[in-house]
Image: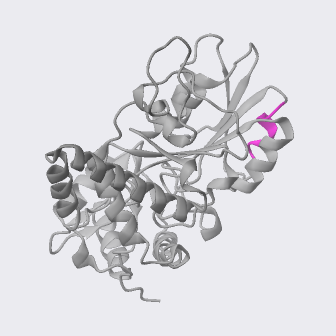
Amino acid sequence: MNAEPLFDPADFAIAPGITHVCAGGETASLRRHGAALSRYLHDKSSGMAGRVAQETEITRARAGIAHYWGTDIGSIGFVSNVAEGVSIVAESLDWRDGDNIVIDANEYPSVAGPFLMHRHPRVALFQARGTEPDRFTAHVNKRTRVIGVSYVSYLTGERHDLHALRALADKVGALLIVDFTQASGYSPIDAAVADFAFSACYKWLLGITGVAIACWNRARQPTWSPASAGWHSFAPGHRGYDRPPPLRADAMRFTRGNPAHAPIYVLAEALDYLAAYDMHAVQAHVQTLTTAMLERLRALQMPTLTPADPARHGASVCVPSTRAQAIVDAMAQNGVLAWNGQGRVRFSFHGYNSTADVDRAIDALRAEWV
């Protein structure tokens, strides 16, 4: 089946003749982002009126994410990156000797690192290995405090069953912390499944670096508070420190200092763009392309790390190779932009891609495969 682009490719800064299949690294920029950044610069130069405009953009972006993720605006805050958000949660927990966290062995460092580096006390890190969907089960026990997972793996493109992990966490009273970075922007998101959820914004969400989403599930964790704070974490209007100032009542307590206004302006524009499309349709589109690519690879007897079943993968197809860097560099010389790293070539699709992009990506890969 031939799939034409769902998004208008002219809306994006993709040069003529380029096949852009590296959304899992960074998506192509929307052309409207230039105007968003110019508006930010104007507002920054406009005194207090400009600050009011900046706050309006923050509210606009939070509302857009809340609508998309199926939650309320108070559950949405901002951090600079996913690792910062996970660190804030990790630092807030009352750890005891013998506690552990369970992750996939291929988990992204932003999810694992804040726990791995915790020193007082040390937190045991249990790794689920292999490819079986239920592989976490054997590692979770009564001392498990956190199950940390990327909804879709950056390394393999595997999509995890979050509802099964939620049930597993609930059996032992553990938190479920989810990184939606490799899914948010093309897939429906159910943030309510997690206690805390995060996402970078510069991939399928069509934003830029400098801001990440932090979601606090207040229904599941109503008494949560961070272990450290900055001026922005506190409720406005309080002076003095005779007693600790109250924290903001919502997820903006994650944001210790000024929010990253310029990336938030861009994010708000990106969310408006994505809101014109049903996420089920976007997911169906990209998975038409991933399925087509996986079938082509299978026919060519080329290896892949990505599960064939669309119910178990996201928008990326990952091909293992010790020559990943050389292959990606050579493909770029021929107008096909893919992503490499960790011993694999990653092809990632979004709404601006088509079946023709799959064909060109396969041809470029075959030309470099030895």
Foreground of the two, 327 or 198? 198
Residue 137 showing in the rendered view: yes
x, y percent for residue 241? 48, 13
Q: Hey, which quadrant is residue 357 in on the image?
A: bottom left
Residue 361 relative to residue 112: left or right: left
x, y percent for residue 60? 40, 59
Foreground of the two, 177 or 3? 177
Foreground of the two, 108 or 156? 108
* Residue shown at 65% from the left, 46% from the top: 217
Residue 235 relative to residue 191: left or right: left
x, y percent for residue 296? 46, 75
x, y percent for residue 26? 32, 55
Magenta part of the chain: 135-141
Answer whether residue 130 is magenta in the image.
no
* Image quarter (top left, top right, bottom left or bottom right) of the C terminus: bottom left
- Which residue appears farthest toward the bottom when viewing the image? 1
* Residue shown at 56% from the left, 60% from the top: 69
